[in-house]
Image (cartoon, rainbow, N blue to C red):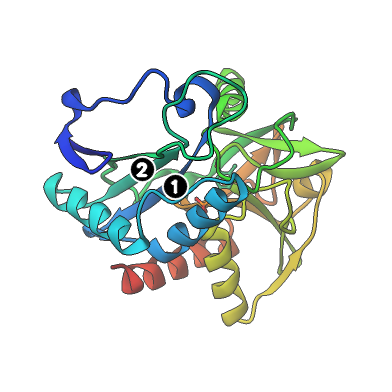
Amino acid sequence: RIVYVNGEYVNESDAKISIFDRGFLMADGVYEVTTVLDGKLIDFDGHAKRLTRSLNELDMKPACTDEELLEIHRELVKRNNVEEGMVYLQVTRGAADRDFAYPKDAKPSLVLFTQDKPGLANSPAAQIGMKVISIDDIRWGRRDIKTVQLLYPSMGKMMAKAAGCDDAWMVEDGSVTEGTSNNAYIVKDGVIITRHLGNEILSGITRAAVLRFAKEAQMKVEERSFTISEAQDADEAFVTSASTFVMPVVEIDGTAVGTGNVGPVASRLREIYLDEMRKAAI
Ligand code: PMP
């Protein structure tokens, strides 16, 4: 496949990044993942805006303009014939002598590649629902910045797999923060409940769209924290992310949620999300 590295489109086997890149040495970088459906980008603007925010929060310079970014995304989708899949983008502070203090004028590294994910929208998992376990949230305190520091979420995913489950919900001070790579929701008596935004969670681009669609469909939304036992006692649970859209959760720590089957609110939101986002794809 063709990848993009600092201004050039090259074969993936020819792509090169310095071993002194601070993304590699210190996880000093941020990323975005934009989904592709029917060869088009889903919510590119949302991802571009969040990237700008992540860069600002870390005192990093953008590697190029949003227009250039869009062009690179489109070019890669075209060159790699991506119909259904994603574009991964990473900006790191760049290469510098290894030191905790970073040079203000480091030249950022920009890398993009695509991944094919056929069947993303028609995923059988969306009919079955996911099983999750709960784990302590021991990540750093700025989870609102989408850094490439993903070791603990990776470990959480492995803990879930070891327990025969699909994912882990992280818990801090008794409340669910989010999933390893998604935002978490419950539904009780028709009300959709998801944690309020703050430094404790990533502000999901899918979350923003789903909450907007829910409100437009006259569904009630409450942005507040909730516990694992409240979730186990809910009528439904689900997660959202760019790559899974709306994905039902049917079991939490071995306890069935509601009927233990995929519920109507999650199904309806998934359908609305996919319909609306396909229409708006660019
Ligand atoms: N929280 C975390 C920790 C994530 O990694 C992700 C996926 N990037 C999300 C939430 C969902 O964000 P989005 O809807 O923008 O994919």
Image position of 274 (left or right of 146) = left
Q: Residues within 10 Å of mark 2 (few under 14, many from 20)?
A: some
Helix, strand or loop for disc 1: strand
- On screen, residue 76 above or below 255: below
Mark 1 CB lies closer than 8 A to ligand 1: yes
First-in-chain label (1 vs 2): 1
Q: CA distance from mark 1 to mark 2?
A: 6 Å
Residue nearer the viewer, 231 or 280: 280
Amino acid type, mark 1: Glu
Q: Residue at x 41, y 47 (%)?
A: 33
Q: Residues within 10 Å of mark 1 (few under 14, many from 20)?
A: many
Inspect the image, locate mark 2, and give the three-letter code of the amino acid beneath it: Tyr
Query: Is 216 located above or below residue 108 in the figure?
Result: below
Q: Which residue is mark 2?
A: 88
Q: Give me the disc on residue 32.
A: 1
**Image location (x, y in percent) of residue 73:** 27, 53
